[in-house]
Image (cartoon, grey):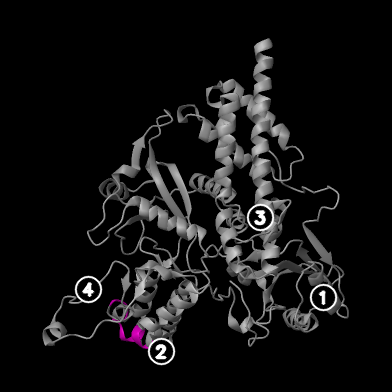
Amino acid sequence: MFPQRLDSTVAYSIAKAMMDGFNRHYQLFRTESSRAKHRFETADWHGQQRAQRERIEFYDLRVREASTRLEREFKAGEQSMDVWQQVKLHYIGLLVNHHQPELAETFFNSVTTKILHRSYFQNDFIFVRPAVSTEYIENDEPGAQPTYRAYYPTLETLHANVVKLVEDFDMHLEFEDLERDVGYVVGALRARLGDVKLRANFQIQVLSSLFFRNKGAYVVGKIINGFNEVPVALPLLHNKNGKLVIDAALFGEDDLLILFSFARAYFMVDMGIPSAYVQFLRSMMPRMPRAEIYNALGLAKQGKTLFYRDFLAHLRHSSDKFRIAPGIKGMVMLVFDLPSFPYVFKVIKDYYPPQKDTTREQIKGKYLLVKQHDRVGRMADTQEYSEVAFPRARFDDELIAEIEKFAPSQLEISDRDGDGQMEVIIKHVYIERRMIPLNIYLQEAFDMGVAEPAAQGQIERAVVEYGNAIKDLVAANIFPGDMLWKNFGITRHGKVVFYDYDEIEYITDCKFRTVPAPRNEEDEMSGDIWYSVGPKDVFPETFGPFLLGNDAVRSVFMKHHADLLDAAFWQTHQVRIRAGHVFDVFPYEQDKRFVRHHDVSVA
């Protein structure tokens, strides 16, 4: 019996060390998130962006720390499977009364799979499903904030209650005119409510922490009246005098979905109980998967875990096959999808055409850049996975042939589990939201006939949004590189989003030039480029022939975005970015703003 007691002691020590590693991770994560308030109050925009970027790395750093400690102190990789089963049981015991059990389970999985050799890796030793419920977790520690605060106004006290609601966030920066701004909010709220009778349960519930992102802070909550709930968000911004203003009142699920979009940077929020925040937000945005809500809150590893569980559940309850994704095939990425599943899977090819002077590592670097950068609502977030197994029976043979031809190093087909079921293992894959490729969206309009009013409207919406997307990317210091329509997609809210990252560059690294005048008639008639072109040279006036071959498209583009063909537009932005200016990019339409003449800052 003595060896068994010894094993149990080692198992508990490993579990406790792993829990210590997670607690250290979440404490650092939460501390960095809470500092966002001070950075906002002091207008430290570059510091805010840097913190958002660096916080993404926290998780992997803590996993490596914990793994190293377990190997050094306990030789964890050499322990028997009996010990590892006990480790999991002890860890479950440590999760009782924990405030972030779902995150701690995912951390356990990350550390365990890093230590255990794959041949020993079994579901018995990780959390395939949650072992501890996240329902009704409360922080009973002295002085701890509740997840949300509730206010119970009448029509007569609505203004005073909204003032108190804002003041309860204890901003250490003066509002320009809080009474005025709350007047705008109350006016918008009354317009939203209309002539609806206020019921006995009429209340405003507001999450206790502000949501910070780049140059904005957001009050997030909901209005409850009878059986109806209306999501609401109030953007707090700096004006040109360094005072605070409430810039808008966003109402309804669609406004909140755009604010929390997968194409935007992650929020910084100080959360004691993240699952309670996710539950609250899910009640406001039931169409947004929990995985994407965790992502939006900066808890991307938890988002990956939940996404994969959702994906496996979808596989179990569907029967269609993976196929080559519709649209023009890319030169660098092989893209496939499952028609019934709203995401696409992207694999880096092994071979590229001569004009694509790049490597696998450089492409991965571009995707990491996008992950860490401010995506300003215009670049799709991606989830990165390794060694993903799919049932072979669910793969179209044409797709298998495509992968074997273009990415053989990324493909393995085997009975890895020894159960007679053949699997397709993809060594490295990016997964992102499916969108309608912009070239297909435009082609649908052309097929209707450009003289049709519906087609005209579709073309105008697409082209105007395309130009807006590029200008937002420029404001974020991103040059898309390949600006063809096929590299952009339309979301369900009609927003144009960029999703092909292998040629992106920082605006500040590019050299925007005007095409030199021809030296002679021979130059003018030549079909070849007769002037020198450096590796980072960009000639905006040459975009036209590739983008504007259709007269209807050209007409709309030249009306709204002709400046994109002028090198001076790009050079002007380049100069301001190099000087430290952080441009304003709004996650809501201009007509939602209360005081449009304010020089305010948000992204």
Question: Marks 4 and 1: in contact by CB < 8 Å?
Answer: no
Residue found 70% across the figure and 55% down from its top? 279
Task: Using the image as rendered, state which of residue 449 and residue 126 is in the foreground.
Answer: 126
Among numbered discs 1 and 4, the one appearing first in the sequence: 1
Question: Marks 1 and 3: in contact by CB < 8 Å?
Answer: no
Number of the front mark, 4 or 2:
4
Q: Which residue is mark 4?
A: 532
Task: Using the image as rendered, state which of residue 141 and residue 336 is in the foreground.
Answer: 141
Among numbered discs 2 and 1, the one appearing first in the sequence: 1
Which residues make up the magenta segment?
546-556
Residue found 46% across the figure and 70% down from its top? 477
* Mark 4 → mark 3, Cα distance in angstroms: 47 Å
Quarter of the figure with the C terminus: bottom right
* Mark 1 → mark 4, Cα distance in angstroms: 62 Å
Mark 4 closeness class: few <14, some 14–19, many ≥20 residues within 10 Å? few
Circle number at residue 163: 1
Secondary structure beneath dot 1 equals helix
Question: Marks 2 and 4: in contact by CB < 8 Å?
Answer: no
* Mark 2 → mark 3, Cα distance in angstroms: 45 Å
Among numbered discs 3 and 1, the one appearing first in the sequence: 3
Circle number at residue 559: 2
Mark 3 closeness class: few <14, some 14–19, many ≥20 residues within 10 Å? some
* Mark 3 → mark 1, Cα distance in angstroms: 28 Å
Q: How many marks?
A: 4
- Type of amino acid under label 2: Lys
Q: Which residue is mark 3?
A: 32
Among numbered discs 4 and 2, the one appearing first in the sequence: 4
x and y percentages locating residue 85 in the rendered image: 61, 25
Residue found 31% across the figure and 64% down from its top? 328
